[in-house]
Amino acid sequence: LLSGGDINAIWVLSPELKNIAYGSILGSSVNAEPTVKEQGALQTVFERNETSSILDGNQITVMTPVPDNVGKAIGVAMVRLPLDQMNQARHHQIKIAVIVAIGALIIGVAIAFVVARRITTPVEKISTAAVAMQKGEFDPRSLVEVSKRTDEIGQLATVFSTMAEEVSARQDYLDALVKERTIELEAKNSELEKTQQQVHDELMVAQTMQIS
């Protein structure tokens, strides 16, 4: 990794910041010893016993504690990563992501157009049927073709037609029941009027007899 330039340095240091282990390559730009800034960060890692990182120029240094069997840091592993290759890799990934996103967008628009054409007409028919049912003018034959579909829209049309027929049948039953009750009430009102008239006539006769 050092020779390939994937990382600039790899060190393992003791709490006294003495080298315990390091990469086999040494030099001013590759595997250089920790800088003053990095040494300060290493002390912080030992004190807090938690991973830390610092950005210095065109490289980032990551430091993580090496714990013993009770979790106490007995050393710190330090890796220095060049940002050049990371930026190149990121830009490459961004390009791939953009290409994939554009391709997905084109495919999505094409699919959406096809699906929209397939869905719009049946949905409009169901919407029209709903308005007709609201006005009491629903014709079950208007959704026959849509009900033949095997997808959710076909199922919706079938359920809607069944519901509309049930509502229509219930409405017819209620209308017939109201008509029957109206006829019964009219008949009872007629009998009541006859009874009232008969009582009135009898009262008149009785009053006439009393006067006489």
Image: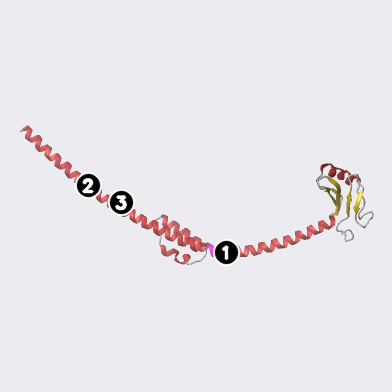
Does residue 180 show up?
yes
Quick check: 83 above or below 36?
below
- For discs 3 and 1, the disc positioned in front in the rendered view: 3
Residue under circle 3? 178
Give the image location of residue 129, x and y in percent: 44, 59
Residue under circle 1? 115
Q: Nearer the N terminus, badge 1 or badge 2?
A: 1
Which residue appears at 43% of the width and 64% of the height? 142
Q: Nearer the N terminus, badge 3 or badge 2?
A: 3
How far apart are the two marked residues, 1 and 2, measured between alpha carbons? 62 Å
20 to the left or right of 99: right
Residue in front for this viewpoint, 55 or 142: 55
Give the image location of residue 84, x and y in percent: 85, 56
Marking on residue 188: 2
Give the image location of residue 159, x and y in percent: 45, 60
Residue 165 figure quarter: bottom left
Which residue appears at 31% of the width and 54% of the height? 176
